[in-house]
Amino acid sequence: MNGRAVPGQDTVDWLGRPVSCGDCPHDEIRQEGRCDLGRVCVRDRRSKRIDGFFSTNPDLASRYLDHPYFEVRVLAAKHASVFTLTPLLNDPESDVRAMVAYRLPVSRIVSLQQDPDRKVRAVLAQRLEGAALVAMFGDEDYLVRIIAVRRAPTDALPIAMSDPDPQVRGEVALRIGEEFLPVMALDIDPLVRLAVAERLPPPQLLALVTDRDLRVRYAVAERGEAAALVKLIDDPDPEVRDKARVRWAELSKGKPT
């Protein structure tokens, strides 16, 4: 609390210059113990120390929303009043725009759906609802689309059944209505078909007993009924055969499955 650097600590600003309390405009709050060189300091380049400063002094955050160091702007935006953040929607740094997207009301951030940085659009996919969220099924980045399909209403998911990325289609298969699963069972990607096999009603698993991927057939052996199991007890893969035979025995004995 004495304005001196802590021994062994790196106390330089974002330009690599040594930090001193001598020319700091916050002498008064230092005297009150609300900043501490080397630990809680807005002029330090380390984000933890900057964040500590704004956490302790949120009333000062709005003063730093135009600071030249982007990390200061990000952390100032984290703590400043939301009423001061709108100008940062056009900040040149994507991390700043992402922080603003987290904090502003949803109605104020819709324009960021077209942001050039995927981290910003990912925040939108986490916060938008309804038609605005479904519109993000068309985002160019598969990670943004994954977030969108995880949150979208299930009745909107058929739109994404033919997504070009199998990871997105796999997420769709986990949530889409059961009536669409037979169509997705024809997907070219085995992990999508596996997700389908883990959700299809047991009577419909018969369609997957000849799947070329052993993981899919194994899932059928775990959940299938007699008609599917009879075709898997002689499966080329020993693990699939064993699972099918164990389940067949359980069904034959009337054990719960």
Image (cartoon, rainbow, N blue to C red):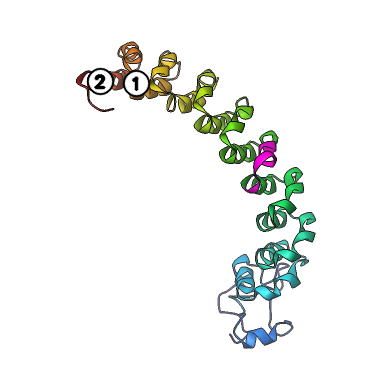
Q: Which mark is residue 251?
A: 2
Q: Classify residue 27 by image quadrant.
A: bottom right
- In the depicted structure, whether residue 217 falls above or below residue 100: above
Inter-mark Cα distance, 2 to 1: 12 Å
Q: Earlier in the sequence, mark 2 or mark 1?
A: 1
Q: Residue at x 45, y 16 (%)?
A: 212
**Residue 244 placement (x, y as % from top left):** 30, 19
Horizontal arrangement in the rendering, residue 81 relative to residue 249 (left or right): right
Depth check: give the residue in front, 151 or 16: 151
Mark 2, other Cα within 10 Å: few <14 / some 14–19 / many ≥20: some
Looking at the picture, how far across and down is residue 216, in whole percent? 43, 22
Residue drawn at (70%, 69%) of the image: 16
User: Secondary structure under badge 2?
Assistant: helix
Left or right: where 22 falls relative to 158: right
* Residue 113 against residue 238 in the figure, above or below: below
* In this view, 143 is above or below 14: above
Crowding around mark 1 (Cα neighbors within 10 Å: few <14, some 14 to 19, many 20+) is: many
Q: Which residue was labeled with disc 1?
A: 221
- Kindly tell me whether residue 92 is visible in this rendering: no
Region in magenta: 127-136
Residue closest to the far left? 253
